[in-house]
Structures are given as structure tokens and as C-alpha cells.
């Protein structure tokens, strides 16, 4: 029997309670469905393949969208991989076949986990330039930067503030943000560098974005699955960003992005792009617009997949990423001069 449980962590803040409650109900309903209606599968290569295919078929949230986007036919995928699991396979061979099947979804939130390996789809960033260099970052940060929990920050020599947030897995408190923004309060503008931020907790993404929000702002929508059909979804429900009750930044700000911006960091870009005083500079983000959930196979391997679709304020899915306001790529010439092309572009933009 499958187990189906929530793996995405949410805030205890009042403004997240409604979404959390909906997702909790979805999980309970799915648990009930899994216990009563799910077919039983044998712990064989064929049984595990069928179990995995049906989990995705009934619970994955982007099958219709990806059929429209690039022609994914999940039924044809079933026929293709049913042939590949015929006969006897070692566990490692089976793992490889199942990972290949999941890769058809082109989703970085879809992972297969076994004791010997972690199946992943990382083509969403591996095939693209990073547009980020630790070597260049050290030149800009020096050694006199300040650290407040999960962020590093300093004032650049042209009176532009710079804030680096590497991952939303690193906690940041309201007091940390107040201290950092107060330190840079006289700056002409602020750069928020989230390049190569692969996501983490939506709580921290929302907490930071709220410091740039001046009034309640529509930032997007979400749905949840209501049945096993590919199109069985609830009506879209609006998501709003509320302004922070603490110190807020009302001057121009720039968010630096690259292809490795994913999941909660991708959502942060959704929030920030909805705000009038913020511009996105850099590369198209990696995407990851579905909240992930997990289930297990008869052999004990666990599979994580996107189960709750999210949309931007225009109602468009951001599963495949977000376009920046200014597409800027790191150049070799700038690198040889010791300059970060994206940071320099942002500094010029803020100075204007």
C-alpha cells in the first residue's frame, strides 16, 4: 500500500494558515484514497513500474500542462517503459529505468530515492551557463561584510546596498531583516542576489519579499487536486503578499537571477516581479512551480513529485521559470577584468 504524506514545510504565520489548511485537507483526502482505493502492486520490476506510473498518473499536477507545453503523453510513456521492465532486472537496473521514466516529466521536483542513489532531473540548469562566480563574489564582498542569520550584506562603494541570500533553507528572522535594511537605509538602491538559490522554505521567501511590499498585492494563484483525473483540480484561489509590519524598503531594488533559481526561490521572483519598485536582472529562472509531496513504492523507494500547481499574478504557470525584466549574461571580458556583469548592470540601473 502506498503511503502519501506532506513533505513541504510551511510557516506558522497567520497569513499562511489558509493555504496550509487547504494542503492539510488535501493530504488527508489523499491518505484516505490511498488506503481504500489504491490497487496493490507486487514488489517486482513490473509491479514497481506500474505503481510509480499510477502514482504520477493520479497525483502529479502538471500532466495536462506538459502535454500542451511539449507533447508529453503519459499513456505512451507507460507503454514505452512497460517494455523496458520485462524480464529480470537488478535493483540498480530497475532504478535506472524508473528514473528515466520520471525524467519524461522534466521536473526538478520529481525525485526517486533509494539507499544507493538519488534520481533527479537537473537539465533545467545543467545545460545553461551559471552566470555566477564565487571568485567574483569574493571580490565584491571582501571581508568586511555583515552576516544576519541566512543573509550576508554590505554597502558597495557607490552607495548601493547588496544582500546575498544563498538558500531559503537558511533561516532569517524579522529582527535580522530589520537590522540589515536599517544598515542600508541611506543607500540609493538595493541589490538582492539570489543566484543559484535552489529554494527551501516559502516562509523565508515571503518574509523577505514582504519588506518590499507597500500594500496588499496579488502575487498569484494555486489549485489542488480533487480527484485522480489529470484535470481534476479545484478552482484557482488567489495568493496575496502582505506588507511587513516592520521596516520596509520603498526605494528601487533589483533581484539577480540565474537558471539555478528554483522552487521557493522561483516563487520569490514571482512575488518580487509583482511589485512596482523591483526589477529582475539576469537569466530566466529554473522554475519549479509545484509544491512537492511524497509517496512510496512496494520496494520501499520513495518518490517525490509536484502535487499543487502555482501560478503568477497573470494566471500563468511558472513551472518552466520566469523571464527577467533585463536578460543579462556574464561575459568573459568582464570576468577577466574581475567584474560581475550582472552586479554592474544592476548598479548602473539603480544609479539611474
Image (cartoon, grey):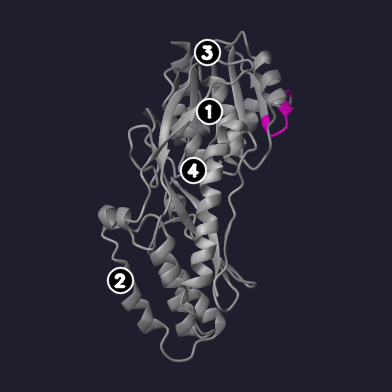
The answer to whether 60 appears left or right of 177 in the picture is left
Which of label 4 and label 3 is nearer to you? 3
Up the image or down, 257 lies above or below 223; here it is above
Q: CA distance from mark 4 to mark 2?
A: 35 Å
| Residue labelled with disc 4 | 130
Q: CA distance from mark 1 to mark 3?
A: 28 Å
Asked if the stretch drawn in magenta spans residue 150, the answer is yes
Q: Position of residue 180 (x, y in %)?
A: 68, 20
Q: What is the quadrant of residue 17 in the picture?
A: top right
| Comes first in the chain, label 1 or label 3 | 3
* Quarter occupied by the N terminus: bottom right
Which of label 4 and label 1 is nearer to you? 4
Q: What is the quadrant of residue 287 in the picture?
A: top left
Residue beneath the point at 53% across and 38% down: 18
| Comes first in the chain, label 4 or label 2 | 2
The answer to whether 146 appears left or right of 109 in the picture is right
| SS assignment at label 1 | loop
Label pair 1/2, CB-CB below 8 angstroms: no
| SS assignment at label 3 | loop
| Comes first in the chain, label 4 or label 3 | 4
Is disc 3 surrounded by few (<14), some (14 to 19) or many (20+) residues within 10 Å?
Answer: some
| Comes first in the chain, label 2 or label 3 | 2
Q: What segment carries the magenta color?
A: 144-151
Label pair 4/1, CB-CB below 8 angstroms: no
Q: Position of residue 25 (x, y in %)?
A: 53, 51
Asked if the stretch drawn in magenta spans residue 308, the answer is no
| Residue labelled with disc 1 | 339
Q: CA distance from mark 4 to mark 3?
A: 30 Å
| Residue labelled with disc 2 | 75
In this orientation, does residue 173 appear?
yes
| Residue labelled with disc 3 | 250
Q: CA distance from mark 4 to mark 1?
A: 15 Å
Amino acid at each position: 500500500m502506498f503511503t502519501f504524506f506532506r513533505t513541504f514545510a510551511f510557516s506558522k504565520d497567520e497569513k499562511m494558515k489558509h493555504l496550509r489548511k487547504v494542503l492539510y485537507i488535501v493530504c488527508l483526502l489523499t491518505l484516505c484514497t490511498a488506503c481504500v482505493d489504491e490497487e496493490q502492486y507486487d514488489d517486482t520490476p513490473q509491479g514497481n513500474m506500474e505503481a510509480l506510473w499510477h502514482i504520477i498518473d493520479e497525483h502529479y499536477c502538471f500532466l495536462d500542462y506538459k502535454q500542451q507545453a511539449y507533447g508529453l503523453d503519459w499513456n505512451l510513456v507507460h507503454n514505452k517503459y512497460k517494455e523496458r521492465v520485462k524480464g529480470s532486472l537488478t535493483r540498480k537496473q530497475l532504478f535506472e529505468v524508473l528514473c528515466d521514466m520520471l525524467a519524461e516529466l522534466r521536473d526538478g521536483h520529481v525525485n526517486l530515492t533509494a539507499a544507493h542513489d538519488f534520481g533527479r532531473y537537473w537539465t533545467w540548469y545543467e545545460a545553461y551557463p551559471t552566470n555566477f562566480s564565487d571568485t567574483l563574489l569574493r571580490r565584491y564582498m571582501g571581508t568586511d561584510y555583515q552576516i544576519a542569520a541566512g543573509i550576508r550584506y554590505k554597502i558597495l562603494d557607490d552607495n548601493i546596498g547588496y544582500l546575498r541570500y544563498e538558500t531559503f533553507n537558511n533561516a532569517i528572522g524579522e529582527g535580522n531583516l530589520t537590522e540589515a535594511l536599517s544598515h542600508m537605509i541611506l543607500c540609493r538602491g538595493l541589490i538582492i542576489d539570489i543566484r543559484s538559490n535552489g529554494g527551501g522554505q516559502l516562509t523565508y521567501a515571503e518574509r523577505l519579499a514582504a519588506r518590499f511590499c507597500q500594500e496588499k498585492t496579488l502575487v498569484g494563484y494555486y489549485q489542488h487536486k480533487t480527484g485522480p483525473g489529470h484535470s481534476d483540480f479545484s478552482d484557482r484561489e488567489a495568493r496575496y503578499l502582505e506588507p511587513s509590519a516592520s521596516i520596509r524598503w520603498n526605494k528601487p531594488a533589483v533581484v539577480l537571477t540565474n537558471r539555478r533559481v528554483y522552487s521557493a526561490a522561483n516563487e520569490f521572483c514571482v512575488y518580487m516581479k509583482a511589485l512596482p519598485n523591483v526589477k529582475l536582472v539576469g537569466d530566466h529562472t529554473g522554475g519549479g512551480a509545484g509544491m512537492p509531496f511524497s509517496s512510496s513504492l512496494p520496494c520501499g523507494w520513495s518518490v517525490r513529485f509536484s502535487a499543487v500547481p502555482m501560478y503568477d499574478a497573470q494566471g500563468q504557470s511558472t513551472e518552466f521559470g520566469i523571464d527577467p525584466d533585463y536578460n543579462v549574461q556574464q561575459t568573459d571580458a568582464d570576468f577577466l577584468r574581475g567584474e560581475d556583469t550582472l552586479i554592474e548592470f544592476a548598479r548602473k540601473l539603480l544609479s539611474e
